[in-house]
Image (cartoon, rainbow, N blue to C red):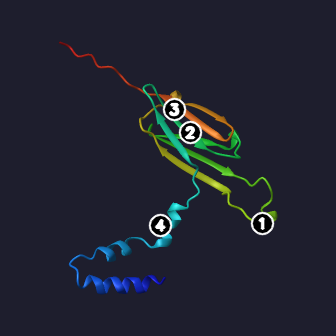
Amino acid sequence: MDIEKIRQWLEITNEYRKSDFWSSVLSEKAPKEFFSRVNRHEPRYDVYRNQTTVCLLIELPGIRLDQISLNLILNKQISIKTKVNPPISNELAIMQQRHYGDIELEIDLPEPTDAHLLTVQYQDGLLYIHYPRQIQNININP
């Protein structure tokens, strides 16, 4: 499929329509740019919250705990940096689907916290980060 031919076709169809919807959509982002963002190699993670606790669960398979760097940014974002090294030399690889190299991930927290309140555990390639919610009751005077 030739994207330039599609653009020409859309220009012709736009002559008969008052809206230039398709040309504005196609001029926004090229497909390669879109898919490069979709295929970034970032770890998958889940965020949970109950009445008392916020919990993050991040997949970091094949990484040792001493290879993980954590930072709390402005009390509302967790920054995770690590590097995935191949367990076997790349020279012997026939096919590789796993990502190797530097990984940087920033996760927006649903509620702000302080670094001293974070509890971090790492087990079986899963990084658990949890902290208590800071909920304060407000008394209403009658």
Please name the residue shown 45% across and 25% down the image.
Answer: 52
Which residue is tagged 2?
A: 57
Residue closer to the observer: 98 or 105: 98
Residue 114 relative to residue 23: left or right: right
Given the image, on which type of amino acid does mark 3 rest?
A: Ala
Mark 3, residues whose alpha carbon is within 10 Å: few (<14), some, or many (≥20)?
Answer: some
State which quarter of the image contains the C terminus.
top left
Given the image, on which type of amino acid does mark 4 rest?
A: Phe
Q: Which of marks 3 and 2 is in front?
A: 2
Please name the residue shown 63% across and 40% down the image.
Answer: 126
Given the image, on which type of amino acid does mark 2 rest?
A: Leu
Mark 2, residues whose alpha carbon is within 10 Å: few (<14), some, or many (≥20)?
Answer: some
**Mark 4 / mark 2, whichever is N-terminal:** 4
Q: Above or below — where is 46 with respect to 18?
A: above
**Mark 3 / mark 4, whichever is N-terminal:** 4
C-alpha distance separating marks 3 and 2: 17 Å
Which residue is tagged 3?
A: 115
Question: Circles 1 and 3: CB distance less than 8 Å?
Answer: no
Which residue is tagged 1?
A: 94
Which residue is tagged 4?
A: 34
Mark 4, residues whose alpha carbon is within 10 Å: few (<14), some, or many (≥20)?
Answer: few
C-alpha distance separating marks 4 and 1: 28 Å
**At which x and y percent is residue 90?**
77, 62
